[in-house]
Amino acid sequence: MANFDKKDSAKRRAVQKLEIQRKFFKALIQNQSLPQKLRYEYILKLHALPKKSSTTQVVQRCVFSGRSRGVLRKFKMSRIWVRQLLAKGQLQGTTKSSW
């Protein structure tokens, strides 16, 4: 799991470092008032940025187990951990449902 943490933190740093530049290029590309040639240059600049700086490369992981699948954003935990903690009543603001 330590390897996941190192990779994940490196990706998050790369995204944070180039986030403003990436948003700037995207805004200029979307601007219809600019000439097509200039917009195309910004497309090339956007593609020249590292792939790891894209926000889609960051994977949501469970804080307890490091599991990448079935992670609930609200709790930042996998569905398995949420279910266990809900059964014990240890998650604040939630109640066990019964009908």
Image (cartoon, helix red, strand yellow):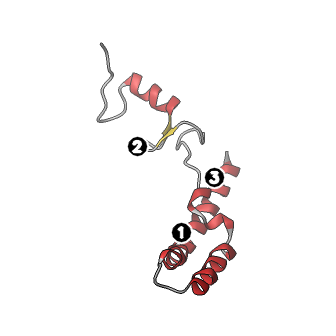
> Marks 1 and 2, how far apart in space?
21 Å
The residue at the point 63 percent across, 52 percent down is: 5
Q: Where on the picture, by quarter, is residue 14?
A: bottom right
Q: Which one is nearer the viewer's eye here, 32 or 90?
A: 32
> Marks 3 and 1, how far apart in space?
16 Å
Comes first in the chain, label 1 or label 2? 1
- Residue 51: percent from the left, percent from the top? 68, 66
Residue bearing mark 3: 5
Tell me the kind of residue under disc 2. Lys
User: Label 1's element?
Assistant: helix
User: Is residue 74 depicted above or below 35 in this figure?
Assistant: above
Tell me the kind of residue under disc 1. Gln
Residue bearing mark 1: 16
- Residue 90: percent from the left, percent from the top? 37, 30
What number is the disc on residue 63?
Answer: none
Tell me the kind of residue under disc 3. Asp
**Which of the two marks, 3 or 1, is nearer to us in this view?**
1
- Residue 85: percent from the left, percent from the top? 43, 29
**Which of the two marks, 3 or 2, is nearer to us in this view?**
2
> Marks 3 and 2, how far apart in space?
20 Å
User: Label 2's element?
Assistant: loop
User: Label 3's element?
Assistant: helix
How many C-alpha atoms fall within 10 Å of the one at disc 3: few (<14), some, or many (≥20)?
Answer: few
Q: Where on the picture, by quarter, is residue 36?
A: bottom right
Comes first in the chain, label 3 or label 1? 3
- Residue 59: percent from the left, percent from the top? 59, 51
- Image quadrant holding the C terminus, namely top left
The residue at the point 68 percent across, 70 percent down is: 50
User: Is residue 59 depicted above or below 71 in this figure?
Assistant: below
The residue at the point 35 percent across, 26 percent down is: 89
Q: Decide: marks 3, 1 in contact (CB < 8 A)?
A: no
Residue bearing mark 2: 74
